[in-house]
Image (spheres, rainbow, N blue to C red):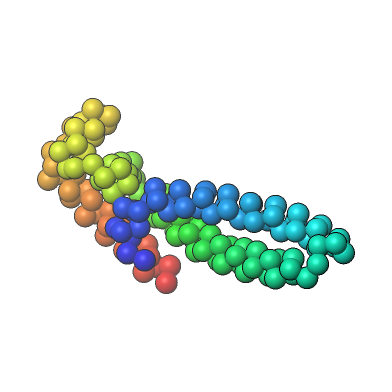
Amino acid sequence: MDVEQGLREYLEIKASVAYLENELNLLWTKGQAGAAAYGNPAVGDGMAGQEEGVHGGRARLAAKLESRRYMLRKLDALLSALDERERFVARKYYIEHMTWRDVVAAYNSEMQSPREVDALKAVRRRMLDKIERLQKSCS
């Protein structure tokens, strides 16, 4: 996974995890209700095919959910390795999709030591270098 792209998609990944968890819970509830109904002889053979479809849907969604959870945990781990300035730049520039002008304005209003665009772009470069080193050390 390209880290910069992952950071840009961070909020979407986080939202998709919540959405998939919700869908799996719904399918689990349907599966429980279907299993109870399947035990009823009046239901007939049609329920067996439905149960297989629900189970296949759950397995597919569970695999997708685990993949998204993995990406989210990886991004969170990488963000946790950053210092305060690097994390600020990552969140504002990549995750919140702010322009450099807006990042500088937010930085200067929220942080103690004001910075210009070039200084924050240098912070971004150091951040990306740090992430690359961390990834290499873990491979």
Front position in the image: 128 or 35? 35
**Where is the C terminus found, in terms of image quarters?**
bottom left
Front position in the image: 100 or 124? 100
Position of 134 with respect to 23 (left or right) is left
**Where is the N terminus found, in terms of image quarters?**
bottom left
Is residue 12 in view from this perspective? yes
Position of 83 with respect to 44 (left or right) is left
Q: Residue 102, position in %: x, y? A: 19, 36
Q: Residue at x 70, y 70 (%)?
A: 49
Position of 3 with respect to 58 (left or right) is left
Q: Residue at x 69, y 55 (%)?
A: 30
Q: Residue 59, position in %: x, y? A: 61, 67
Front position in the image: 28 or 109? 28
Could you tell me how many numbered marks the image carries? 0
Q: Against 117, is 7 above or below?
A: below
Is residue 77 in view from this perspective? no
Q: Residue furthest right?
A: 41
Q: Quadrant of residue 98?
A: top left
Q: Residue 24, position in %: x, y? A: 61, 55
Q: Residue 86, position in %: x, y? A: 29, 46
Q: Against 132, is 108 above or below?
A: above
Q: Residue at x 18, y 50 (%)?
A: 122
Position of 67 with respect to 128 (left or right) is right
